Amino acid sequence: MSAAVVQSESHAVELQSLRVRYNDTEVLRGVGFFVQPGEIVSLLGPSGCGKTTTLRSIAGFVTPDSGEVLLDGRDVTEAPVHRRGIGMVFQSYALFPHLSVFDNVAYGLRMRKVPREEMERRVTEALALVKLEEFAHRRPKQLSGGQQQRVAMARALVIRPKVLLLDEPLSNLDAKLRQEMQVELRRLLKATGAASVFVTHDQQEAMVLSDRIILMNAGEIVQEGTPEEIYREPRSLFAAAFVGQANFLYGKVVAVLGGGLVRISVDGHLLEGFACGELASGDAAAMVVKHECVSPVCEGKQGLDANTLGCTFEMANFTGASVQLHCTAAGQPFVCLTNAAQHCGPIGAGTELFLQWEKSDSLVFPATPH
């Protein structure tokens, strides 16, 4: 339920119908949600969807044209950045190169005129939290990317904010370190007890880090829920396309069956799946099937409650634990992601084979004619 409907002092962050316009472009269109203390919420979506503007509105760098920003029940919509008590971690880390790790972390406390003894204790605690105690006297250039990211985290946490904002803080790391830091970052965020709002366009990152994901597109919230809900229960064709890797088969509804099932015709092939939205016979429809739900029929065996589709094999990509089979099915691209150990073996380009997937893994959405 959106923050525009529910208001509670227990919400660490609450946005009510935020609208932001840049010149003639409305970049936020009534955005509203809340974040509870200790909760990690990710704003996920494509570039230009409004997620960074939302984060900057919470921080105070952007003043909305209408709507309200509440922190711990207090209206801070017009309050300056330094009066919001928010910790921020930037994409670039924004560390001072001429200062030691200790002094970088202590910077916010010095600005707040915290007594020296307390400052030293809190900086030491923050560095211990990110496991960098022994690096206190090094300069940022003497640290790895992952270590610099943790210094930025310690600097944000040392002021003990109730709200922590993170703007793609892992995007500058290499792929392996980025995956390692995702788990570490979630541990750190949970240890603080702060409400955390995390901006990313990386869906895998959002899945690992978040308690809840807010999916945005074109300045609006498309869907929100747990990572599993967003992945397994998309409520729109956009959500199904953006989250995870999926196949799309375009056709027409030929029958509305019981139990929410519909039958569609895709280039003459009859397939069944569960309707997502209002569908009637004759409607244009798109069936969405995740890559990992599709299996090759290696020995002519077909599941009793499965959709089966003949296809032409094009190529295979070995990815380590799995193999991607790229095919053409019903005149449309189709991908099967199969376990490498269970792969049927070498298949020549142009080979005709069958793919199958459970009807329960088929979601059917209304679609414009393709």
Image (cartoon, grey):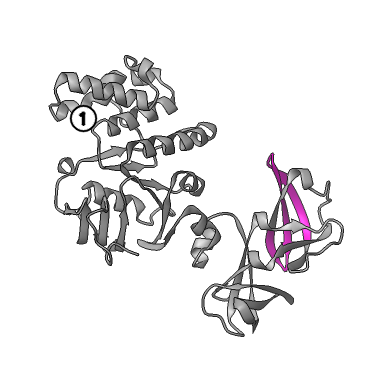
Up-down relation of residue 166 to residue 72 (above or below): above
Residue 329 lies in the magenta-colored region: yes
Q: Is residue 338 left or right of residue 191?
A: right
Residue labelled with disc 1: 108
Query: Whole-percent x and y of residue 220?
Result: 36, 63
Provide the residue span drawn in magenta.
312-334
Looking at the image, which residue is at 71% across and 63% down? 357
Query: Whole-percent x and y of residue 39?
Result: 36, 47
Looking at the image, which residue is at 67% across and 57% down? 293
Label 1 neighbour load within 10 Å: few <14, some 14-19, many 20+: some
Residue 238 lies in the magenta-colored region: no
Q: Is residue 236 left or right of residue 218?
A: right
Query: Whole-percent x and y of residue 147?
Result: 41, 25
Which residue ends up furthest to the bottom in the rendered image?
A: 281
Up-down relation of residue 291 to residue 113 (above or below): below
Q: Is residue 328 left or right of residue 231?
A: right
Classify mark 1: helix, strand or loop. Answer: helix
